[in-house]
Amino acid sequence: MKLNKYGVESLDFANPTAVKLLNKALLGYYYGVKNWDFPDENLCPPIPGRADYIHYIADLLAEENNETVPTGKEITVLDVGIGANCIYPIIGVIEYDWNFIGSDVDKKSIHSARQIIDSNEQLSGEITCRFQVNAEHIFEGIIDPSDKIDVTICNPPFHASADEAISGTRRKVRSLSGKRIAKPDLNFAGVNNELIYEGGEYQFIQNMISESTNFAKNVRWFTTLVSKSSNLNGIYKLLEEVAAAEVKTIPMATGNKATRIVAWRFER
């Protein structure tokens, strides 16, 4: 804790350890998850924003279920990039009792996610982790021909380079602390594959849209977060080119951060 610029005691959000402890406390208090740990270099997610995504997905599925959120094992969700923290499946299992598949290109992240799952009774057996052998693919090698998935979710890496990631962190730390720091610690941490993708967020989503056409019969809804509003027009054009049957944009906001979910599907 520290005094903020108004002289009020507040959490030190520029401190990675403080942020991780806060999120552990939120998961324990609101979701009953007592064992949640992962390497400090991995991304530490802000719980409220992650919960928002899951709840908006629940609303999306409710639209085709007489406005009632479907719960239980009949719903299967694929989390593209489960990460070492396993956060989206945790919230989805606890809140809605959904089945989850989590994919990742990093073996250490898969191992960490499995440890979290195995060390919490309410998660054990509810989440399947699949390692993506080819980092150039997103759905290929993960979705089996027999899989029937209700919705895919993804929080894509949004930086195109390490320099861009550091620059973004400098801005965030300056906003939180008022200090200019040349080499700041990432307050939400994150290893390269979690934050950086060649071509950035737009290229990642472009690849996702392209691959989604091959799994139109396996997946009801494909969705992704889109952090940069400047990418939206290009994304809509790509979805038009692949003849998506329906496209939805769902606005999201947590604190002073505005983002959105883009969802699309094909005729089944």
Image: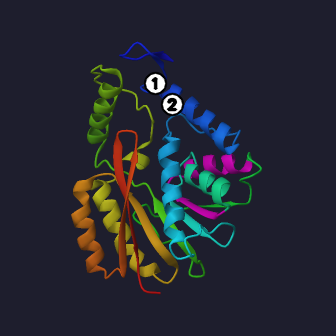
Q: Position of residue 258 (x, y in %)?
A: 34, 47
Q: Position of residue 240 (x, y in %)?
A: 27, 78
Total number of numbered discs in the rendering: 2
**Residue 1, above or below 144:** above
Residue 128: which quarter of the image? bottom right
Label 1 crowd bin: few (<14), some (14–19), many (20+), radius 10 Å: some
**Residue that lies at the very extreme toward the right in this rendered image:** 121
Q: Are marks 2 and 1 in contact (CB under 8 Å)?
A: yes
Q: Position of residue 63 (x, y in %)?
A: 50, 72
Start and end of the magenta stretch? 98-118
Q: Residue drawn 45% across and 81% down? A: 216
Q: Which residue is mark 1?
A: 15
Taking the image as drawn, is residue 104 in sight?
A: no
189 displayed left or right of 82: left
Q: Which residue is mark 2?
A: 19
The type of residue carrying mark 1 is Asn
**Residue that lies at the very extreme toward the bottom in this rendered image:** 268
Q: Residue drawn 50% across and 39% down? A: 44
143 displayed left or right of 212: right
